[in-house]
C-alpha cells in the first residue's frame, strides 16, 4: 500500500468525521435532512469512532500521553515554582499549597465511544434524551491506562480533580458513580468532580472551576481533549484559538497534555465561524481543507 496516500486518506476521513456542533459532550452529527447534505449524516463519524474503538495507534497514543504526564508530575513535585494554570487563574503563594492535577472526564479519562457508535449504527443525531440515557447507564469505560495513571498520581499524594462539562445537577450522581466504579480516586462526597453548573463555581467556562481549585491547591498538570479544557475563550474562530495558544506553546507535553479526539469537539465550530451564516456547513468545512501541492 502506498503509505503516503493511505495516511492522507485516513486524515481526511478523520477530519470529516467530526462535524458536530456542541463542545460540551460527545455528539454524533445530525442525520442528513436534504439531498444537498446541508447537515452531514451521523455515519460521518464512522471512521473517527472506529479508530478510537479499534486502532492500536489510538491506544498507543493515549498510553504514551499518560506516561509523559507521569514524568512531568515527578518533575513538578520537585519544583515548588511549577504551576500549570494559565495567566489570571492562580494566586500568589501557591508554592506552599498541596499538589493537585486537573483532568477532563469524557475522552480524557473515560471513553464514550459506545454512545457515538450507537448513533452511527442507528444513523441518529444527538439529543439530550439519548445522552442522559447513556450517562445514567454508567457504562463509560476507562481509556487505556487511565486508571493506572490516576492511581500513580494518587499514590504520589496528589489530588485529582475532574472538571467536566457534563451538567449539574442532572448528571452528577451518575458521573460520580461511573468514575468510582472504574477505580478512579473519587472523594467520598464526590467533591473532586466538578460539573458545569456546580454551585461552587457556576460559570459555564472551566476557568472558574480551576480558580476554585487554586484557592486550596497548587495545580501541576492539566489534561483534556479540547482547547477549552486548558483556556477559556476557546469557542472562537481558528485564528483566535491560535492566538490563545501562542503564549503556552512550550507547555504542551510538559504541563498540558491533550488527548486525541477526532469524534467531536469545538474545533469544527471554529472552522464554521469563518464562513457566512447562510453557507452550507458541509461546503464550509470542505473549503477549509488544504489540498493543493
Image (cartoon, rainbow, N blue to C red):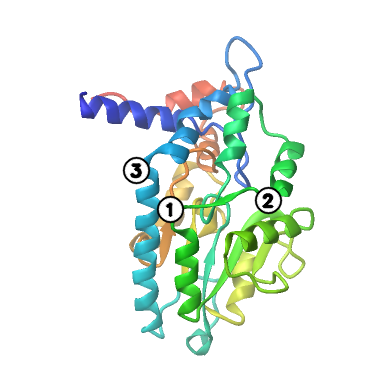
Residue occupying image coordinates x 54% and y 33%? 272
**Residue identifier under label 3:** 57
Choose mark 3 or mark 1, whichever is in front: 3
Choose mark 2 or mark 3, whichever is in front: 2
Residue occupying image coordinates x 63% and y 41%? 22
Q: Distance between the residues labelled 1 and 2?
A: 38 Å
Identify the disc placed on residue 138: 2
- Nearer the N terminus, badge 1 or badge 2? 2
Choose mark 1 or mark 2, whichever is in front: 2
Kindly indicate the quadrant of the structure image that contains residue 207: bottom right
Q: Nearer the viewer, residue 292 or 135?
A: 135
Direction top: furthest residue:
35
Q: Which of 116 and 227 is in front in this view?
A: 116
Kindly indicate the quadrant of the structure image that contains residue 68: bottom left
Q: Nearer the viewer, residue 249 or 252?
A: 252
- Nearer the N terminus, badge 3 or badge 1? 3
Q: Distance between the residues labelled 2 and 3?
A: 26 Å
Image height check: is 111 above or below 72?
A: above
Residue 289 position in % (x across, y down): 39, 28
Residue 256 position in % (x across, y down): 42, 63
Q: The C terminus appears in which quarter of the rendering?
A: top left
Task: Please tell me how crowded label 2 is: few (under 14), some (14-19), or many (20+) other residues with Cα within 10 Å.
Answer: some
Secondary structure at numbered mark 1: helix
Residue occupying image coordinates x 51% and y 50%? 226
Image height check: is 157 above or below 57?
A: below
Amino acid at each position: 500500500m502506498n503509505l503516503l496516500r493511505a495516511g492522507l486518506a485516513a486524515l481526511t476521513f478523520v477530519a470529516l468525521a467530526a462535524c458536530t456542533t456542541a463542545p460540551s459532550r460527545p455528539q454524533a452529527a445530525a442525520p442528513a435532512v436534504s439531498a444537498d447534505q446541508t447537515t452531514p449524516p451521523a455515519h460521518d463519524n464512522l471512521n473517527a469512532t472506529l479508530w478510537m474503538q479499534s486502532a492500536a495507534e489510538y491506544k498507543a497514543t493515549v498510553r504514551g500521553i499518560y506516561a509523559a504526564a507521569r514524568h512531568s508530575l515527578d518533575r513538578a513535585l520537585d519544583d515548588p515554582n511549577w504551576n500549570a494554570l494559565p495567566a489570571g487563574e492562580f494566586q500568589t503563594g501557591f508554592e506552599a499549597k498541596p499538589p493537585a492535577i486537573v483532568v477532563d472526564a469524557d475522552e480524557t479519562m473515560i471513553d464514550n465511544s459506545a454512545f457515538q457508535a450507537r448513533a452511527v449504527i442507528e444513523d441518529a443525531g444527538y439529543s439530550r434524551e439519548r445522552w442522559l440515557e447513556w450517562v445514567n447507564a454508567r457504562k463509560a469505560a476507562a481509556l487505556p491506562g487511565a486508571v493506572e495513571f490516576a492511581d500513580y498520581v494518587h499514590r504520589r499524594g496528589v489530588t485529582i480533580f475532574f472538571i467536566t462539562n457534563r451538567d449539574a445537577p442532572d448528571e452528577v450522581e451518575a458521573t460520580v458513580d461511573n468514575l468510582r466504579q472504574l477505580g478512579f480516586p473519587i472523594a467520598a462526597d464526590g467533591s473532586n468532580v466538578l460539573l458545569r453548573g456546580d454551585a461552587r463555581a457556576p460559570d459555564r467556562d472551566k476557568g472558574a472551576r480551576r480558580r476554585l481549585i487554586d484557592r486550596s491547591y497548587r495545580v501541576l498538570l492539566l489534561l483534556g481533549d479540547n482547547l477549552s479544557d486548558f483556556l477559556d475563550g476557546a469557542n472562537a474562530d481558528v485564528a483566535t484559538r491560535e492566538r490563545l495558544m501562542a503564549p503556552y506553546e512550550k507547555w504542551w507535553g510538559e504541563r498540558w497534555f491533550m488527548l486525541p479526539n477526532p469524534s467531536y469537539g469545538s474545533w469544527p465550530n471554529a472552522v464554521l465561524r469563518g464562513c457566512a451564516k447562510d453557507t452550507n456547513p458541509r461546503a464550509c468545512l470542505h473549503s477549509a481543507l488544504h489540498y493543493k501541492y
